[in-house]
Amino acid sequence: MQIRVLGCSGSIAAGNRTTSFLLDDNVLIDAGTGVGDLTLEEMAAVDHILVTHSHLDHVLSIGLLADSVTRRRMAASQPPVVVHALPATIAALRLHVFNGVIWPDFTRLPDTTNPVLRFEPVEVGQVLDLGRRRVEVLPACHTVPAVGYAVLGSQGAWVFTGDTGPNAALWQRLRSLPVAALVIETAFRDDELALARISRHLCPSQLQQELACLQAPADVYITHIKPGEMDTVMAEIDAQRSEHRIQALHAGQVMTLAD
């Protein structure tokens, strides 16, 4: 399997894109501003979007992608792009985004018989069969209902925590799920611990406690660092001298794992 990092920042700035990953060539995991780095042909090839939660930095490109690919997918008689998300996330998208005020409802356009988008609810623990790929829905602990995802492979899983604070339920699941690569957020510096707790994100000291729950040394990629904070956050993480192989995630990075 191949996973291309389109965006991995918590906010935008020059050179920064918000969270999105392209799995192989037809599955998006979250749909932040990083989706804009895809060509129109690459966007039109996307058949599934897995959404972690309803916050804007993770969903804002869903509607823009739908608008961009409508004619191409209709001309090719392609089915709707399926947006997989928690029921609460789907409700938020319907109410606040695809409402005809902020953005047109592409689950009814070009018409109700052949829409560009279709929402499909998921639940924690569910395993999604997406053609060649199987993806498990993982628990997350955030300020809104949220999940993470594990792309299952023959020699271990690629795990994305999504936005989450300390999350005992995640580690309980990962004890029985071999982790080939872990993408985990660390949004704040340690001097912003209070803010991290309020917003249910992680800072380096919390990350250290979370990673102690992993059963064996692993490749760990840090995401969702705020623009301008990369050096500070990574220095605080490096100072912990973890047994894990930790590096900052970068847009454009490609991770290849055994199928």
Image (cartoon, rainbow, N blue to C red):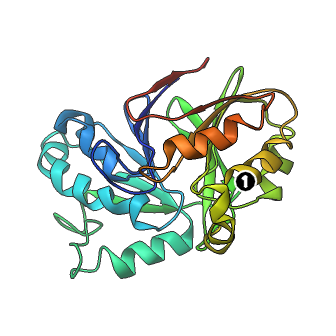
Q: Quadrant of residue 187?
A: bottom right
Task: State left or right for residue 176 relative to residue 142.
Answer: right
Residue under the point 75% across and 54% down:
206
Query: How far across and down, in percent of the image, does residue 248 sit?
Result: 55, 35
Viewport quadrant of the C terminus:
top right
Residue 59, given in percent of the width and then of the height, sits at: 39, 60
Disc 1 marks which amino acid? Gly
Instruction: Give the mark count.
Output: 1
Q: Looking at the picture, how far across and down is residue 129, in whole percent? A: 57, 40
Q: Which residue is mark 1?
A: 125
Q: Quadrant of residue 218?
A: top right
Residue 35 placed where, x, y %? 31, 45
Query: 96 or 218: nearer the eye?
Result: 218
In this rendering, position of residue 146 left or right of residue 81: right
Relative to residue 91, is residue 63 depicted above or below?
Answer: above
**For residue 53, above or below residue 213:** below
Residue for point 79% across, 36% down: 177
